[in-house]
Amino acid sequence: MSAVSTQGKPAVQQKVNPLEKLAKALHDDLAAVNAIILDRMRSDIPLIPQLAGHLIAAGGKRIRPVLTLASAALFGYKGARQHKLAASVEFIHTATLLHDDVVDASDQRRGRASANALFGNEAAVLVGDFLFSRSFQLMVEDGNLDVLRILSNASAVIAEGEVLQLSTANNLETTEDQYMQVIGAKTAELFAAACEVGAVIAERSSGECRTMREYGQCLGIAFQISDDVLDYAASEERLGKSLGDDFREGKMTLPVIKALQHATDKERRFWKRCMEEVKQDEIDFKEALRLLQAHNALDVSLETARQFAARGRQLLKDLPTHPLRNELAELITFAVERDY
Amino acid sequence: MSAVSTQGKPAVQQKVNPLEKLAKALHDDLAAVNAIILDRMRSDIPLIPQLAGHLIAAGGKRIRPVLTLASAALFGYKGARQHKLAASVEFIHTATLLHDDVVDASDQRRGRASANALFGNEAAVLVGDFLFSRSFQLMVEDGNLDVLRILSNASAVIAEGEVLQLSTANNLETTEDQYMQVIGAKTAELFAAACEVGAVIAERSSGECRTMREYGQCLGIAFQISDDVLDYAASEERLGKSLGDDFREGKMTLPVIKALQHATDKERRFWKRCMEEVKQDEIDFKEALRLLQAHNALDVSLETARQFAARGRQLLKDLPTHPLRNELAELITFAVERDY
């Protein structure tokens, strides 16, 4: 059992993963998207499909393309434009992942085999650029300037969020507002754009496009806060990766910011050493976890996520009645209540 | 005097730099482009204008935006669309520069203060992404799908060229064909796109757009070969940077490929140690230069560049008579005959 689910929250029905239900309902669409993804990561330069495949072909959760597909279907769109656009959204995400993992020499602490660790920083950066360009080529083929505007704006906002995150890393003074600004940009913006694009190609009113966009934003924020909590508290076995990556990098996420708000001087010195100076012993992660629990910081963080989830569910009520609408409501609940 | 100009070539009239003449003729346009560049690199995240300014505001040669401006003017275009598009082209170039300088820990040999050395790899990558996104936002504002297609294709080709270059680095088996493929993609593609865009917004025939594009391609290739020769043979004082960067990185450029074609076994072992194993002593650069000169490799490389310059001048004859046409002819000559 995870540290989170032991704290008196209702047990989650783990057998129902709404993302899998969505993927099943959108099976044919998703197969079309995957075919486009595989087709467009081809290149005469072998290193490109090799490295891109390391991330893409392995098949991630595909949550962003699923959002575009679900949004288009929810709004009754009948064509096939959502396939290229969903692939485009996934390429932006993959490019961001590749670039996110590029680290400075002094920062190579993470144990996992990221693309940059396997292929080198330079290759990861350049293949990311290639996928980013491919993403724009797909949008240009679609040919809708509104879509191009939404996704090019999203790309710029994501990059700004990533740069802001750099400035907050290892900085104990990072505020809750700054944290929300970072995740609103680096994570929620692409969720929002992915949702909005589906409504735009269905030619819905600007109000409906905005509502769908805002649902995506809430989902992205809820999802990211939960992710940041799970980095301290997930069930390691189910998560499939080790805990504590954020801690080891001195990344200022919401749980730490919440714990710092009530920290004693001694605790503050602990966080300063671990997060700012990044001088950590083996036992420090356990101590961090103890402090987070002592200040109830994980639950308080999840409470913030739950507020965004509630807002997201509320927004869905203004959208057309459709089986997928229920799935999207379950998805945003799951984003917060999962334990992996 | 440089190693190149001592080899019996006609002296270049260094007082006439055709790029400066073009910049003077297009002064008002270029001022408008610079204003857009400064405006669009703004961000609430201070690190972004700070890092971007390190490269952009310092004011590079601006050769690519000048090409877009010159092409539009040459074809009699009377509007203002070329300004945003020239800025867009410069942003793509700057993003590429930032990403090009990202190095792996083991590769940090270059002495100069590149953006990544000053700000770190992560920041250089992310600000590059931001500028790349800004570039697409500018194109989307322009709203022409042909232009969007040309520049998004160019971005993908550039990224492919950069990845191919990675695969050829430190590889003595790199062929002349592979070298031409690399520079055709990483350098000439953006020169070509910059030229083509000017003709496209002037709504010229597809034949004229193609001719202008091909001129840009020839210019880019001539320019890059010359650059690679100058890295061994420029006048250091005029170049403003130290020689031998390519050599120290084991970059397989045309002069080395040409010298290898006639290398003795002993010379081959020298190149293998220096370029593949990157084991170099202080005196090795001098020895490399001696071998390049013994095989006439610098002049033979420049001869290839001169052929592209001649082809470029030939292409210009099919374009409208215009004072700028002469400047463009001088520019492609200068690209090869300069000694810095």
Image (cartoon, coloured by chain):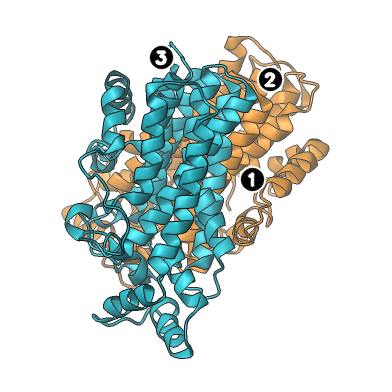
Chain colours: A orange, B cyan
Picture coordinates of residue A324 (x, y %)?
74, 28
Mark number displayed over residue A201? 2
Chain ID, mark 1: A
Which is more toward the observer, B100 or B284? B284
Specify the amino acid type for callout 3: Ala
Q: Which residue lies furthest to the bottom in this view?
A: B266
Taking B192 as reference, is B5 above or below it? Answer: below
Q: Residue at x 53, y 56 (%)?
A: B182
Query: Residue under circle 1?
Result: A12
Q: What element carries label 1?
A: loop
Q: Which of marks 2 and 1 is in front?
A: 2
Residues beneath discs 3 and 1 located on the same chain: no
Specify the amino acid type for callout 2: Ile
Q: Mark 3 Cα within 10 Å, few/some/many (few <14, many 20+)? A: few
Question: Picture quarter containing residue B120?
Answer: bottom left
Number of marks drawn: 3
Residues beneath discs 2 and 1 located on the same chain: yes
